[in-house]
Amino acid sequence: MPATALRLAITGGIGSGKSTVGQLFVKLGASLIDADALSHELTVAGGAAMAPIAARFGSSVQTQDGALDRAAMRALIYEDPLARRALEDIIHPLVAQLASERGHHAEQTGSRCIVYDIPLLAESSAWRQRVDRVLVIDCASDTQIARVRQRSQLERAAVEAIIAVQATRLKRLHCADCVIDNSVASLAQLAEEVRHIAIHFGL
């Protein structure tokens, strides 16, 4: 048994299948730490990010109970790139701290593999330095759009706007140690590929 757990980051664009791959690794015994879930945890009413968010953006981005109003914030950051950067400057360090704490706990309780689901890994040099391997889940943009529209009932233009502010496919692939092409794979095929990758990484 290795002295320390393998830290594996999963990244990919919206609709690429990161969450599905993460759950497949969990079935193989890995611990999963989801950056989006941590972000939601930090922005509920009373969450650690809400006081600095309110101080920076005011009450217009809060719901009546004091949680983050995601629709209002989404509209704001698509109009103003500086607002996006300000929000990231608040959220990202808190997510990194919480992820580190959860990862340490998982390792202390015997996990041999800690999988970090990090949508914005390619946009952050800091995350690459915190993990041992990066697995990129790749697919064509038309596939991303179709999946997101089906699950979220968003208009095509709204999905395209989300993709436009994420890292390009090329940038994500550039930071990959391993790639899964999830454009047309069935769940069974995806599970088999994840199993082979797990074996390759010694899990």
Image (cartoon, rainbow, N blue to C red):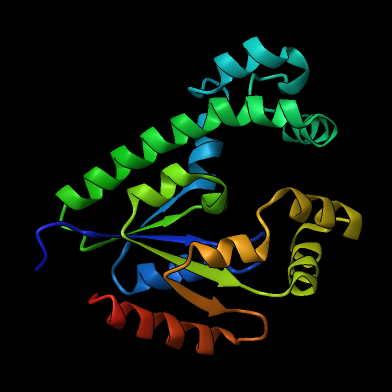
**In the rendered image, which quarter is residue 65 located in?**
top right
90 displayed left or right of 58 = left
Q: Quadrant of the N terminus?
A: bottom left
158 displayed left or right of 94 = right
The residue depicted at 62 percent of the width and 19 percent of the height is 53
Q: Is residue 189 visible?
A: yes
Q: Quadrant of the C terminus?
A: bottom left
200 displayed left or right of 167 = left
The residue depicted at 50 percent of the width and 52 percent of the height is 118
The residue depicted at 73 percent of the width and 13 percent of the height is 59
From the top left corner, tell me how far across and down residue 95 is, in percent.
46, 36
How many marks are shown on the rendered structure? 0
From the top left corner, tell me how far across and down residue 175 is, in percent.
49, 62
79 displayed left or right of 140 = right
Q: Is residue 127 above or below residue 54?
A: below
The residue depicted at 46 percent of the width and 30 percent of the height is 93
Q: Is residue 43 visible?
A: no
From the top left corner, tell me how far across and down residue 83 is, in percent.
73, 26
From the top left corner, tell me how far across and down residue 167 is, in percent.
65, 54
Q: Is residue 82 above or below residue 100?
A: above
